[in-house]
Image (cartoon, rainbow, N blue to C red):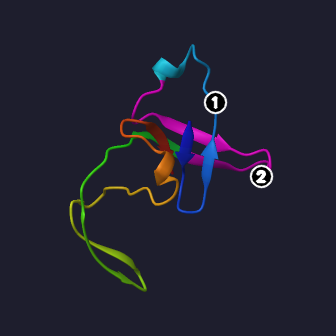
Amino acid sequence: ARVNCSEELEIEFSVAEGIIAAVKQGMKATVRFAAIPGKSFAAQVAEVQKRAVTLGELTDEGLEVFDGLVPGDRVITAGVSVIREGQLVLIR
């Protein structure tokens, strides 16, 4: 699966076929990287849902979204070309 953990990081990982059905939305996960020994990152499994939004202007602070999001929604900003609706991803 391809996972977007933040605006700066996208990772790919494999899940054994025998346990993939056990991975559910909302599950907690811990992400570790061999390149960063001794450090771990908290993450959570979420399901991708496509949503129509109304966009405004691009400002110094980012792109304005006028409609289609509610407080607390998370937005994937990297790797969107490879994400499918209903796909499970890790968020951190």
Viewed as shown, does residue 32 lie left or right of 20?
Answer: right
Please name whichever residue, 76 or 40, is drawn nearer the observer in this view of the structure.
Answer: 76
Q: Is residue 47 above or below residue 7?
A: above
| Mark 2 vs 1: CB contact within 8 A | no
Q: Is residue 84 magenta?
A: no
Judging by the rendered image, the residue that carries numbered circle 1 is 14
Crowdedness near tag 2: few (<14), some (14–19) or many (≥20) residues, C-alpha within 10 Å: few
Judging by the rendered image, the residue that carries numbered circle 2 is 36
Which residue is drawn at the image coordinates 80% and 50% (left, top)?
A: 35
Q: Earlier in the sequence, mark 2 or mark 1?
A: 1
Q: Is residue 37 magenta?
A: yes
Image mark for residue 49? none
Report the amino acid beneath label 2. Answer: Ile
Q: Is residue 28 above or below residue 68?
A: above
Which residue is drawn at the image coordinates 77% and 52% (left, top)?
A: 36
Magenta residues? 23-42
Location of residue 24 in the rendering, given as x and y in whole percent from the top left corner: 42, 28
Location of residue 69 in the rendering, given as x and y in whole percent from the top left corner: 24, 60
